[in-house]
Image (spheres, rainbow, N blue to C red):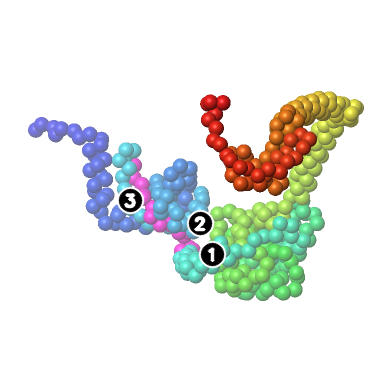
Amino acid sequence: MAASKPITVTQLNRFISALFSSSPPLMSASVAGEISNFAVNSTSGHMYFSLKDQASRISCVMFRSDAARLSFMPKDGDEVSVSGKVVLYERAGSCQINVRAMRLSGSGALYEQFQRLVEELKAKGLFDDSRKKKLPFFPKKIAVLTSQDGAAVRDIISVVARRSPATKVIVCPVPVQGMNASVEIARMLDYVNDWLECDLAIIGRGGGSIEELWPFNEMPVVEAVLRSRIPVVSAVGHETDFTVCDFVCDLRAPTPSIAAELAVPDVAALMANVAKSKASMAAALAQKVSNAESRINRAKSSALFTRPESLFESFSQELDMARDSLEKSIGALIDSYALKLDVSRKLLVSNSHEHVLGKGYAAIFKGSVPLDADKIQVGGNYVIHSRSKSANAIIGTVEERNHHNG
């Protein structure tokens, strides 16, 4: 009997993958185990990890779109239960779970309650940035609501003392876990608002399980934060822990120490910046003064200050020249008019009656008005004036003369 033709590795992996896809239990599997080798791809945002128990492990991937719905950040050692699709990664020929959902084992009910509460309050707009209060730049008094025996209060006091020694820290002891803790925290925050005259409040505690952090998810704390007149900073748990208090507060800090850093400025750094700015301003002012002195010295050495009269010498010379030119022009104009006047006078004299009569001519007047000889009429009574005599005459005849005949 002849042996069958072998298939390729790819064909085999595709065959196994098809078997997985046709198996309903593998299409929607729920698996519990401990997380190990957890990593998040910085580019894609996908989460890669292994799920293990005492005897076995299986690879898992949670794609970014599914990971975005998580209310906590997974880490190595977390006991979780995941649900998703078991598949064969054909390229490597390895089995893996494509995780669609994840929750911490033993706390699944609390996480589901937490997620429902978050969605409910978010829908009401209680997480909106528009209702959050701005922290004061330089608070004089800070109330810290936490356990007086925990590390959180020591961290906050230490950081505030180092960064802003003038800021007063008032420790307001409250239970941070257990029965009625949320009621006590809410009552203390109301007391701070009504009586302590603080600039802001920090509510916080160290890390813990979801059960230990649960008081910060309960409505008494949520409502107290919402009605607080002063800004509230939430510093509950570690960086990967989230509570409802974190969402409704005015500012969420990953840890109590960071909450203190966010609450007060670094006075030493501010003073250093002030000193630097002061030195920069002094240098700029000194440069301005130096530039002004240079301009003054240049001005003092200029002709305006050393020989101010020199500024007018050229103008004085130009004025003399203009005056001489004007005088010459006026003199020439006067001479011209004088000559014209003399010519007119001589012409007037030469044409006057006296001048004409002085040449031996006589003039005929009718009354006192000179008469044109062509207007003489027969029988007219006229006066004839010569240079030295006057005669009355009555015209007997008038004869027309031909000028061409003399």
Magenta run includes residue 104: yes
- The residue lying toward the viewer, choosing from 254 and 380, is 380
Residue 309 percent location from the top left of the image: 89, 29
Q: What residue type is labelled 1?
A: Phe
In the visual, does 144 lie left or right of 30? right
Magenta run includes residue 314: no
> Which residue in the protein does label 1 denote?
127
Label 1 to label 3: alpha-carbon separation: 37 Å
Q: In this view, does 181 lie above or below 252?
A: below
Instruction: Mark 3 or mark 2: name the one nearer the start of the chain.
Output: 2
Q: Is residue 11 above or below residue 152?
A: above
In the visual, does 95 lie left or right of 129? left
> Which residue in the protein does label 3 denote?
86
Eye-nearest disc, 1 or 2: 1
Q: Give the residue at x 62% y 56%.
A: 253
Tell me the quadrant of the picture where the N terminus can be found: top left
Is residue 335 something one can see in this rendering? yes
Is residue 298 something one can see in this rendering? no
Residue 192 percent location from the top left of the image: 71, 71
Q: Which amino acid does label 3 sit on?
A: Val
> Which residue in the protein does label 2 denote?
72
Q: Quadrant of residue 179?
A: bottom right
Query: Mark 3 falls on what kind of element?
Result: strand
Span shown in magenta: 94-110
In the visual, does 398 lie left or right of 270? left
Query: Mark 2 falls on what kind of element?
Result: loop
Q: How crowded is mark 3: few (under 14 residues within 10 Å), some or many (20 or more)?
A: many
Contact (Cβ within 8 Å) of mark 1 with mark 3: no
Instruction: Mark 1 or mark 3: name the one nearer the start of the chain.
Output: 3
